[in-house]
Amino acid sequence: MYTAPFEYHSPSSVAEALGLLAKLGDDAKVISGSQSLVPMMKLRLATPAHLVDLRKVPGLNGVSESGGAIQIGGMTTHAAIGANALIRQRLPMMAEAAVQIGDAQVRNLGTIGGSLAHADPSADWPAVLMALDASVRIGSARGERSLRVSDLIIGPLTTALQPGELLLGVSVPLPSGRYGGAYEKLPHPASRFAIVGVAAEVFLDKGGAVQSSRIAMTGLGSKASRASAVEQALQGKPAGAAAIDAAAARAAEGIEIRADLTGSAAYKANLAAVYCSRAVKRAVGRALER
Ligand SMILES: Cc1cc2nc3c(=O)[nH]c(=O)nc-3n(C[C@H](O)[C@H](O)[C@H](O)COP(=O)(O)OP(=O)(O)OC[C@H]3O[C@@H](n4cnc5c(N)ncnc54)[C@H](O)[C@@H]3O)c2cc1C
């Protein structure tokens, strides 16, 4: 299947890209790694009249540390994130998630900005970045704004990005104290998308009890969401296996789980509890090493 005809634009700066998007309006779509957009265009689920390619735009790629946060350019590929020394050392949960995305082609071409803008309900980055309380930097001809990832993703393939807006980068605050994070995923055997993925960031107090946690899950409902019941059940409890299992059993509470060809809602609720327990236990293990 071929795509519908479109006009191709290759801007050489962010300002030029934003100018094109402002001029072309709803008729234009940005293209980054092409891993989600091109299949959609071939299926005629997307028929943009103009494509604005970000690959030759400088300044949107790479990982750096500033202002107490890790800054990741929107065009940074999954493979580059998985291999980045700063991320592997400071935010190992992100490296863990990156290397489990799709196959080598998807990881080498697909970008973190493209993944967030696409908002697939089984994608890995939304859950991981919600657990890390990350924000995105959004640019348009009108200026820049920042939005938490939890507010960016609205539903399946739906975000708070407005026409003319570009996702410029992701800012992940560096945690402090006695913390640890981990990502556990059951990948679909064909696509590697998450049947369930659980990202857990846990903070312990000096006595080894859970001070707070952020746990986010993907693959279950119409979008990634926090496992609030688990977070509440863990708070103040000694971070031992029994307490974690009891809390994780509540993983699916409040989530409208989608039954599909990979399993019933009850099966997925059980998976959520199992993967939640695994993620929290590994996160606690990392926190105890600090
Ligand atoms: C076989 C296969 C397996 C996959 N497995 C996984 C997986 O296991 N886990 C996972 O999370 N994902 C998976 N993916 C999706 C993959 O991560 C894609 O790379 C990602 O969803 C889209 O990123 P992209 O850079 O390719 O974006 P594109 O395909 O270029 O664009 C996707 C959408 O985002 C918009 N967009 C792109 N960049 C920006 C930007 N900077 N600002 C605003 N809008 C933008 C585009 O207009 C388009 O609507 C898989 C994809 C394939 C094909």
Image (cartoon, helix red, strand yellow):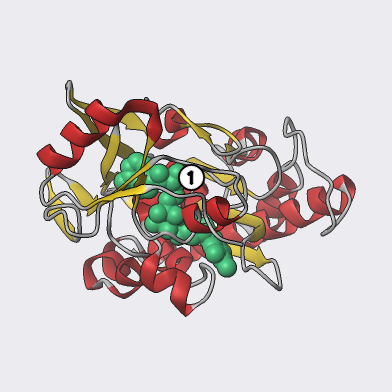
Residue 203 visible in rendering: no
Q: Name the quarter where the N terminus is drawn.
A: bottom right
> Relative to 154, does residue 48 appear above or below in the rendering?
below
Residue 172 visible in rendering: yes
Residue 275 x %, y %: 68, 59
> In the shown orientation, is residue 86 left or right of residue 136?
left
* Front residue of this view, candidates 209 and 282: 282
Residue 147 x %, y %: 33, 29
Residue 114 x %, y %: 39, 50
Q: Residue at x 56, y 51 (%)?
A: 40
Q: Residue at x 40, y 61 (%)?
A: 94
Q: Label 1 amino acid? A: His
> In the shown orientation, is residue 128 left or right of residue 230?
left
Q: Residues within 10 Å of mark 1 (few under 14, many from 20)?
A: some
* Front residue of this view, candidates 190 and 204: 190
User: What residue is pinned by disc 1?
Assistant: 118
> Relative to 76, does residue 237 appear above or below in the rendering?
above
Q: Residue at x 69, y 72 (%)?
A: 190
